[in-house]
Image (tube, rainbow, N blue to C red):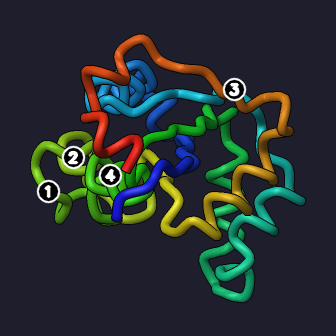
């Protein structure tokens, strides 16, 4: 059964530098996802260490940290039915040159490490990531005027 979810998306420094922020946001909007939180920030060592805890012992971690601290990032929380899997399809597989045409990485990326965007991979990751970047008062609960055109009543109430 489908359920309403929230997921975290980061527009990484390479996408910001390349001027892809508007295009990326536009793709999620066009799909029908609802933006419930957005901000631009510089990631701190503390956030990066927690965010990428599973990579901290790997040889590439210092390079990853430097990359993520290079410029500010744009952090967003998107909401929708099955938002996590939907967003990951829009984002595409990790390595840009192997990503599906039509996905963000497939259309704009060539690299595995300079891969433009992050998207939560599970409800647990989304919750952890949201709490690392957003306070509760930065996430907005509202009814979108277009929700009745995006979902059937059965999908939302069922």
Residue 36 placement: quadrant: top right
Which residue is drawn at the image coordinates 78% and 29% (left, top)? Answer: 138
Mark 3 vs 4, N-terminal side = 4
- Name the disc covering residue 100, or none: 1
Which residue is nearer to you in this view: 97 or 102? Answer: 102
Q: Nearer the viewer, mark 1 or mark 4?
A: 4
User: In the rendered image, which residue does mark 3 sit on?
Assistant: 140
Which residue is drawn at the image coordinates 85% and 39% (left, top)? Answer: 135
User: In the rendered image, which residue does mark 2 sit on?
Assistant: 103
Which residue is nearer to you in this view: 1 or 29? Answer: 1
Name the residue furthest left.
101
Indicate the position of residue 158 as horizontal and vertical percent values: 37, 51
Label 1 and label 2: CA atoms lie apart by: 6 Å
User: In the rendered image, which residue does mark 4 sit on?
Assistant: 86
Mark 3 vs 2, N-terminal side = 2
- Name the disc covering residue 55, or none: none
Is 145 drawn above or below residue 58 in the view shown?
above
């Amino acid at each position: 059964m489908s359920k309403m979810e929230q997921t975290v998306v980061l527009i990484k420094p390479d996408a910001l530098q390349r001027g892809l922020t508007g295009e990326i946001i536009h793709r999620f909007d066009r799909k029908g996802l609802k933006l419930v939180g957005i901000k631009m920030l510089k990631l701190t060592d503390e956030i990066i260490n927690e965010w990428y805890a599973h990579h901290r012992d790997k040889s590439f971690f210092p390079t990853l940290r430097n990359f993520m601290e290079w410029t500010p990032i744009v952090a967003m929380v998107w909401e929708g039915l099955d938002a996590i899997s939907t967003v990951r399809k829009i984002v595409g597989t990790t390595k840009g040159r192997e990503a599906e045409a039509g996905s963000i990485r497939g259309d704009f990326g060539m690299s595995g490490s300079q891969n433009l965007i992050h998207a939560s991979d599970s409800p647990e990751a989304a919750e952890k990531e949201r709490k690392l970047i957003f306070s509760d008062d930065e996430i907005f609960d509202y009814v979108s005027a277009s929700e009745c055109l995006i979902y059937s009543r059965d999908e939302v109430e069922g």
